[in-house]
Image (cartoon, rainbow, N blue to C red):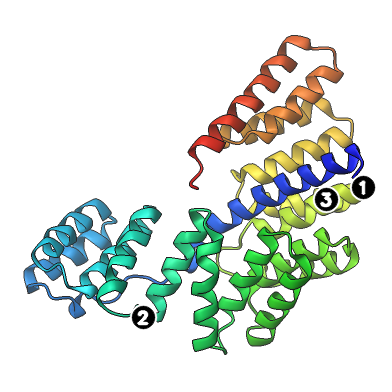
Amino acid sequence: MRPDKLVAVALLTLLLAATAWGQNMQDASTAPNPPATSSLPLSPEQQQLLQESLKARNYAGAEKLLVAEIEKKPQSAELLRFLASVFFLDGRYLNTAVALKKAEKIAPLDNPSRFTLALSYIILDHRDWARPELEALANVEPRTALYPYWLGRLDYDEMQFTSAVAKLRKALELDPAYMKTYDNLGLCYEALGQYDEAIKTYQEAMRLNRLKPQPSPWPPVNLGTLFIKLGKLEEADAALAESLRYDPRFPQARYELGLLREKQKRDDDAIAELKQAAELNPSYAEPHYALGRIHQRKGDTKNAEIAFETFHRLKRDNSKTRPQ
Protein backbone atom coordinates (compact mmCIF):
# COMPACT_ATOMS: atom_id res chain seq x y z
CA MET A 1 0.00 0.00 0.00
CA ARG A 2 1.29 3.48 -0.88
CA PRO A 3 2.37 5.66 2.11
CA ASP A 4 -0.34 8.23 1.41
CA LYS A 5 -2.98 5.52 1.52
CA LEU A 6 -1.56 4.18 4.78
CA VAL A 7 -1.89 7.64 6.29
CA ALA A 8 -5.46 7.93 5.00
CA VAL A 9 -6.44 4.58 6.52
CA ALA A 10 -4.87 5.54 9.85
CA LEU A 11 -6.73 8.87 9.92
CA LEU A 12 -10.00 7.15 9.04
CA THR A 13 -9.48 4.65 11.85
CA LEU A 14 -8.89 7.45 14.37
CA LEU A 15 -11.93 9.37 13.16
CA LEU A 16 -14.21 6.35 13.38
CA ALA A 17 -12.90 5.46 16.84
CA ALA A 18 -13.50 8.99 18.10
CA THR A 19 -17.02 9.09 16.66
CA ALA A 20 -17.86 5.66 18.04
CA TRP A 21 -16.52 6.55 21.51
CA GLY A 22 -18.54 9.73 21.75
CA GLN A 23 -21.74 8.11 20.58
CA ASN A 24 -21.23 5.02 22.71
CA MET A 25 -21.19 7.27 25.77
CA GLN A 26 -24.33 9.02 24.55
CA ASP A 27 -26.05 5.69 23.89
CA ALA A 28 -25.35 4.46 27.40
CA SER A 29 -28.76 5.98 28.12
CA THR A 30 -30.32 2.93 26.44
CA ALA A 31 -29.37 0.73 29.40
CA PRO A 32 -32.33 -0.47 31.47
CA ASN A 33 -33.10 1.31 34.73
CA PRO A 34 -32.83 -0.62 38.01
CA PRO A 35 -35.80 -2.89 38.77
CA ALA A 36 -38.19 -2.11 41.60
CA THR A 37 -36.61 -2.31 45.03
CA SER A 38 -39.59 -4.31 46.29
CA SER A 39 -38.15 -7.41 44.61
CA LEU A 40 -34.98 -7.27 46.71
CA PRO A 41 -34.36 -9.23 49.93
CA LEU A 42 -34.25 -6.06 52.04
CA SER A 43 -36.20 -4.81 55.02
CA PRO A 44 -38.88 -2.16 54.35
CA GLU A 45 -36.61 0.44 55.97
CA GLN A 46 -33.70 -0.53 53.71
CA GLN A 47 -35.92 -0.46 50.64
CA GLN A 48 -37.09 3.04 51.50
CA LEU A 49 -33.54 4.24 52.12
CA LEU A 50 -32.42 2.73 48.81
CA GLN A 51 -35.31 4.40 46.94
CA GLU A 52 -34.49 7.75 48.51
CA SER A 53 -30.80 7.42 47.60
CA LEU A 54 -31.63 6.60 43.97
CA LYS A 55 -34.15 9.43 43.73
CA ALA A 56 -31.50 11.85 45.02
CA ARG A 57 -28.90 10.30 42.69
CA ASN A 58 -26.86 9.44 45.75
CA TYR A 59 -25.40 6.41 44.01
CA ALA A 60 -22.52 6.08 46.47
CA GLY A 61 -25.01 5.75 49.32
CA ALA A 62 -27.06 3.16 47.42
CA GLU A 63 -23.92 1.20 46.57
CA LYS A 64 -22.74 1.21 50.20
CA LEU A 65 -26.09 -0.14 51.38
CA LEU A 66 -26.16 -2.88 48.73
CA VAL A 67 -22.54 -3.95 49.24
CA ALA A 68 -23.17 -4.31 52.99
CA GLU A 69 -26.18 -6.53 52.32
CA ILE A 70 -24.33 -8.63 49.74
CA GLU A 71 -21.64 -9.33 52.33
CA LYS A 72 -24.42 -10.85 54.47
CA LYS A 73 -26.12 -12.58 51.51
CA PRO A 74 -23.31 -13.44 49.04
CA GLN A 75 -25.55 -15.84 47.09
CA SER A 76 -28.18 -13.20 46.31
CA ALA A 77 -28.15 -12.79 42.53
CA GLU A 78 -30.94 -10.21 42.86
CA LEU A 79 -28.81 -7.90 45.00
CA LEU A 80 -25.81 -8.29 42.70
CA ARG A 81 -27.88 -7.49 39.61
CA PHE A 82 -29.39 -4.44 41.30
CA LEU A 83 -25.96 -3.28 42.46
CA ALA A 84 -24.70 -3.62 38.88
CA SER A 85 -27.50 -1.38 37.60
CA VAL A 86 -26.61 1.27 40.19
CA PHE A 87 -22.93 1.02 39.25
CA PHE A 88 -23.95 1.62 35.63
CA LEU A 89 -25.93 4.73 36.55
CA ASP A 90 -22.86 5.90 38.50
CA GLY A 91 -20.60 5.46 35.46
CA ARG A 92 -18.63 2.65 37.12
CA TYR A 93 -18.72 0.27 34.18
CA LEU A 94 -16.00 -2.14 35.28
CA ASN A 95 -17.78 -2.59 38.61
CA THR A 96 -21.01 -3.17 36.65
CA ALA A 97 -19.45 -6.00 34.68
CA VAL A 98 -17.83 -7.59 37.73
CA ALA A 99 -21.10 -7.55 39.69
CA LEU A 100 -23.04 -9.07 36.80
CA LYS A 101 -20.50 -11.83 36.22
CA LYS A 102 -20.70 -12.69 39.92
CA ALA A 103 -24.49 -12.78 39.65
CA GLU A 104 -24.29 -15.00 36.58
CA LYS A 105 -22.34 -17.61 38.54
CA ILE A 106 -25.29 -17.85 40.92
CA ALA A 107 -28.18 -17.72 38.42
CA PRO A 108 -28.65 -17.00 34.69
CA LEU A 109 -28.86 -13.30 33.87
CA ASP A 110 -32.18 -11.88 32.77
CA ASN A 111 -32.19 -10.09 29.43
CA PRO A 112 -32.03 -6.50 30.79
CA SER A 113 -29.02 -7.44 32.92
CA ARG A 114 -27.31 -9.13 29.98
CA PHE A 115 -27.87 -6.02 27.88
CA THR A 116 -26.39 -3.84 30.64
CA LEU A 117 -23.38 -6.16 30.70
CA ALA A 118 -22.97 -5.82 26.91
CA LEU A 119 -23.13 -2.01 27.11
CA SER A 120 -20.55 -2.01 29.90
CA TYR A 121 -18.20 -4.08 27.76
CA ILE A 122 -18.65 -1.67 24.85
CA ILE A 123 -17.90 1.39 26.96
CA LEU A 124 -14.88 -0.42 28.43
CA ASP A 125 -13.68 -0.98 24.84
CA HIS A 126 -14.14 -4.77 24.96
CA ARG A 127 -16.41 -5.13 21.96
CA ASP A 128 -15.24 -8.73 21.51
CA TRP A 129 -16.83 -9.54 24.88
CA ALA A 130 -19.99 -7.61 24.07
CA ARG A 131 -20.72 -9.31 20.76
CA PRO A 132 -21.63 -12.79 22.09
CA GLU A 133 -23.88 -11.22 24.71
CA LEU A 134 -25.75 -9.21 22.06
CA GLU A 135 -25.95 -12.19 19.71
CA ALA A 136 -27.46 -14.28 22.50
CA LEU A 137 -30.04 -11.55 23.16
CA ALA A 138 -30.85 -11.25 19.46
CA ASN A 139 -31.52 -14.99 19.30
CA VAL A 140 -33.78 -14.90 22.36
CA GLU A 141 -35.63 -11.72 21.33
CA PRO A 142 -35.55 -11.68 17.50
CA ARG A 143 -38.21 -8.94 17.30
CA THR A 144 -36.22 -6.44 19.40
CA ALA A 145 -34.49 -3.80 17.26
CA LEU A 146 -31.97 -2.75 19.90
CA TYR A 147 -29.79 -5.84 19.50
CA PRO A 148 -29.20 -5.75 15.71
CA TYR A 149 -28.69 -1.99 16.14
CA TRP A 150 -25.86 -2.57 18.60
CA LEU A 151 -24.40 -5.43 16.58
CA GLY A 152 -24.34 -3.03 13.65
CA ARG A 153 -22.54 -0.52 15.84
CA LEU A 154 -19.92 -3.15 16.66
CA ASP A 155 -19.43 -3.92 12.97
CA TYR A 156 -19.03 -0.19 12.30
CA ASP A 157 -16.41 0.12 15.03
CA GLU A 158 -14.53 -2.78 13.39
CA MET A 159 -14.81 -1.06 9.99
CA GLN A 160 -17.02 -3.88 8.66
CA PHE A 161 -19.31 -1.34 7.03
CA THR A 162 -21.26 -3.57 4.64
CA SER A 163 -22.13 -5.96 7.46
CA ALA A 164 -23.04 -3.00 9.66
CA VAL A 165 -25.45 -1.69 7.01
CA ALA A 166 -27.22 -5.06 6.87
CA LYS A 167 -27.67 -5.21 10.64
CA LEU A 168 -28.82 -1.60 10.91
CA ARG A 169 -31.33 -2.07 8.11
CA LYS A 170 -32.63 -5.12 9.99
CA ALA A 171 -33.02 -2.94 13.07
CA LEU A 172 -35.02 -0.43 11.01
CA GLU A 173 -37.34 -3.19 9.82
CA LEU A 174 -38.11 -3.92 13.46
CA ASP A 175 -38.31 -0.27 14.56
CA PRO A 176 -38.57 2.25 11.68
CA ALA A 177 -38.78 5.20 14.08
CA TYR A 178 -35.51 4.71 15.96
CA MET A 179 -33.53 7.85 15.18
CA LYS A 180 -30.14 6.53 16.28
CA THR A 181 -30.31 3.69 13.77
CA TYR A 182 -30.65 6.16 10.89
CA ASP A 183 -27.83 8.27 12.30
CA ASN A 184 -25.44 5.33 12.52
CA LEU A 185 -26.56 3.97 9.16
CA GLY A 186 -25.59 7.35 7.73
CA LEU A 187 -22.11 6.95 9.21
CA CYS A 188 -21.80 3.56 7.49
CA TYR A 189 -22.90 4.90 4.09
CA GLU A 190 -20.46 7.78 4.51
CA ALA A 191 -17.60 5.37 5.32
CA LEU A 192 -18.51 3.37 2.17
CA GLY A 193 -18.37 6.53 0.07
CA GLN A 194 -22.12 6.38 -0.66
CA TYR A 195 -22.59 10.05 0.10
CA ASP A 196 -26.04 10.54 -1.42
CA GLU A 197 -27.39 7.67 0.67
CA ALA A 198 -25.60 9.04 3.73
CA ILE A 199 -27.15 12.48 3.28
CA LYS A 200 -30.67 11.06 2.88
CA THR A 201 -30.21 8.84 5.91
CA TYR A 202 -28.85 11.65 8.10
CA GLN A 203 -31.76 13.83 7.01
CA GLU A 204 -34.23 11.16 8.10
CA ALA A 205 -32.41 10.91 11.43
CA MET A 206 -32.74 14.67 11.80
CA ARG A 207 -36.45 14.56 10.97
CA LEU A 208 -37.07 11.98 13.67
CA ASN A 209 -34.75 13.82 16.02
CA ARG A 210 -36.83 16.99 15.75
CA LEU A 211 -39.84 15.09 17.07
CA LYS A 212 -38.09 14.34 20.36
CA PRO A 213 -38.70 16.46 23.47
CA GLN A 214 -34.93 16.84 23.81
CA PRO A 215 -33.31 16.40 20.38
CA SER A 216 -29.77 15.06 20.20
CA PRO A 217 -27.04 17.28 18.71
CA TRP A 218 -25.41 14.28 17.01
CA PRO A 219 -27.43 13.82 13.77
CA PRO A 220 -27.02 17.41 12.54
CA VAL A 221 -23.33 17.49 13.47
CA ASN A 222 -22.78 14.24 11.54
CA LEU A 223 -24.51 15.69 8.49
CA GLY A 224 -22.62 18.96 8.89
CA THR A 225 -19.32 17.07 9.02
CA LEU A 226 -20.14 15.30 5.75
CA PHE A 227 -21.16 18.56 4.08
CA ILE A 228 -17.81 20.09 5.08
CA LYS A 229 -16.06 17.09 3.55
CA LEU A 230 -18.05 17.54 0.32
CA GLY A 231 -17.43 21.29 0.18
CA LYS A 232 -21.12 22.13 0.70
CA LEU A 233 -20.37 24.89 3.14
CA GLU A 234 -23.77 26.62 3.29
CA GLU A 235 -25.50 23.31 3.99
CA ALA A 236 -22.87 22.54 6.65
CA ASP A 237 -23.49 25.90 8.30
CA ALA A 238 -27.23 25.19 8.58
CA ALA A 239 -26.72 21.67 9.97
CA LEU A 240 -24.21 22.81 12.59
CA ALA A 241 -26.47 25.70 13.60
CA GLU A 242 -29.23 23.15 14.25
CA SER A 243 -26.88 21.03 16.37
CA LEU A 244 -25.94 24.07 18.46
CA ARG A 245 -29.58 25.02 18.94
CA TYR A 246 -30.02 21.69 20.71
CA ASP A 247 -26.82 22.08 22.74
CA PRO A 248 -24.82 25.33 22.49
CA ARG A 249 -22.07 23.69 24.57
CA PHE A 250 -21.63 20.65 22.33
CA PRO A 251 -17.84 20.43 21.75
CA GLN A 252 -18.06 18.42 18.52
CA ALA A 253 -20.33 21.01 16.91
CA ARG A 254 -18.03 23.85 17.98
CA TYR A 255 -15.05 21.93 16.58
CA GLU A 256 -16.73 21.27 13.23
CA LEU A 257 -17.89 24.89 13.07
CA GLY A 258 -14.27 25.93 13.60
CA LEU A 259 -13.22 23.76 10.64
CA LEU A 260 -16.01 25.26 8.57
CA ARG A 261 -14.97 28.82 9.42
CA GLU A 262 -11.41 27.93 8.45
CA LYS A 263 -12.60 26.72 5.05
CA GLN A 264 -14.57 29.95 4.70
CA LYS A 265 -11.29 31.84 5.31
CA ARG A 266 -12.67 33.34 8.54
CA ASP A 267 -9.64 32.52 10.65
CA ASP A 268 -10.52 34.66 13.67
CA ASP A 269 -13.96 33.03 13.92
CA ALA A 270 -12.39 29.61 13.41
CA ILE A 271 -9.92 30.19 16.24
CA ALA A 272 -12.73 31.34 18.55
CA GLU A 273 -14.83 28.23 17.83
CA LEU A 274 -11.90 25.85 18.20
CA LYS A 275 -10.86 27.43 21.49
CA GLN A 276 -14.42 27.08 22.75
CA ALA A 277 -14.50 23.40 21.75
CA ALA A 278 -11.27 22.83 23.67
CA GLU A 279 -12.57 24.68 26.73
CA LEU A 280 -15.84 22.74 26.74
CA ASN A 281 -13.95 19.43 26.70
CA PRO A 282 -10.42 19.81 28.10
CA SER A 283 -9.49 16.28 26.96
CA TYR A 284 -10.55 16.94 23.34
CA ALA A 285 -7.31 16.84 21.34
CA GLU A 286 -8.47 17.58 17.78
CA PRO A 287 -9.31 21.30 18.24
CA HIS A 288 -5.69 21.93 19.28
CA TYR A 289 -4.36 20.36 16.09
CA ALA A 290 -6.66 22.56 13.99
CA LEU A 291 -5.58 25.61 16.00
CA GLY A 292 -1.93 24.73 15.41
CA ARG A 293 -2.54 24.45 11.69
CA ILE A 294 -4.20 27.87 11.53
CA HIS A 295 -1.54 29.55 13.68
CA GLN A 296 1.20 27.98 11.56
CA ARG A 297 -0.39 29.20 8.34
CA LYS A 298 -0.68 32.69 9.81
CA GLY A 299 3.01 32.66 10.76
CA ASP A 300 2.33 32.54 14.53
CA THR A 301 5.00 29.95 15.28
CA LYS A 302 4.82 30.23 19.07
CA ASN A 303 1.07 29.56 19.36
CA ALA A 304 1.31 26.87 16.68
CA GLU A 305 3.92 25.00 18.73
CA ILE A 306 1.84 25.33 21.89
CA ALA A 307 -1.25 23.98 20.11
CA PHE A 308 0.59 21.04 18.53
CA GLU A 309 2.28 20.15 21.83
CA THR A 310 -1.10 20.22 23.59
CA PHE A 311 -2.59 18.00 20.87
CA HIS A 312 0.14 15.35 21.27
CA ARG A 313 -0.01 15.51 25.07
CA LEU A 314 -3.78 14.99 25.12
CA LYS A 315 -3.49 12.11 22.67
CA ARG A 316 -0.97 10.42 24.95
CA ASP A 317 -3.06 11.10 28.06
CA ASN A 318 -6.24 9.84 26.42
CA SER A 319 -4.58 6.62 25.31
CA LYS A 320 -3.49 6.00 28.92
CA THR A 321 -6.79 6.78 30.61
CA ARG A 322 -9.28 5.35 28.14
CA PRO A 323 -10.65 1.99 29.38
CA GLN A 324 -9.14 -1.07 27.71
Residue 118 in view here: yes
Tell me the CA gap for discs 1 and 2: 49 Å
Q: Is residue 277 above or below residue 247?
A: above
- Rendered location of residue 21, percent (x, y): 59, 52
- Rendered location of residue 275, percent (x, y): 66, 29
Say which amino acid is labelled 1.
Gly
Tell me the CA gap for discs 3 and 1: 9 Å
Say which amino acid is labelled 2.
Asp
Residue lying furthest top: 302
Residue occupied by mark 2? 110
Q: Residue at x 56, y 77 (%)?
A: 147
**Looking at the rendering, which quadrant does residue 63 occupy?**
bottom left
Query: Do the CB atoms of the residues marked 1 and 2 lie less than 8 Å apart?
Result: no
Q: Secondary structure at mark 3?
A: helix
Return the disc, 2 or 3, that comes first in the chain's sequence.
2
Q: Residue at x 40, y 55 (%)?
A: 93
Q: Is residue 186 left or right of residue 44?
A: right
Residue occupied by mark 3? 236
- Rendered location of residue 41, percent (x, y): 13, 76
Residue toward you, 136 or 96: 136
Return the disc, 1 or 2, that comes first in the chain's sequence.
2
Label 3 vs label 1, nearer the camera: 1
**Looking at the rendering, which quadrant does residue 297 occupy?**
top right
Q: Where's the N terminus, which quadrant?
A: top right
Residue occupied by mark 1? 231
Label 1 vs label 2, nearer the camera: 2
Label 2 vs label 3, nearer the camera: 2
Return the disc, 3 or 1, that comes first in the chain's sequence.
1
Q: Is residue 151 above or below residue 8?
A: below
Q: Secondary structure at mark 1?
A: loop
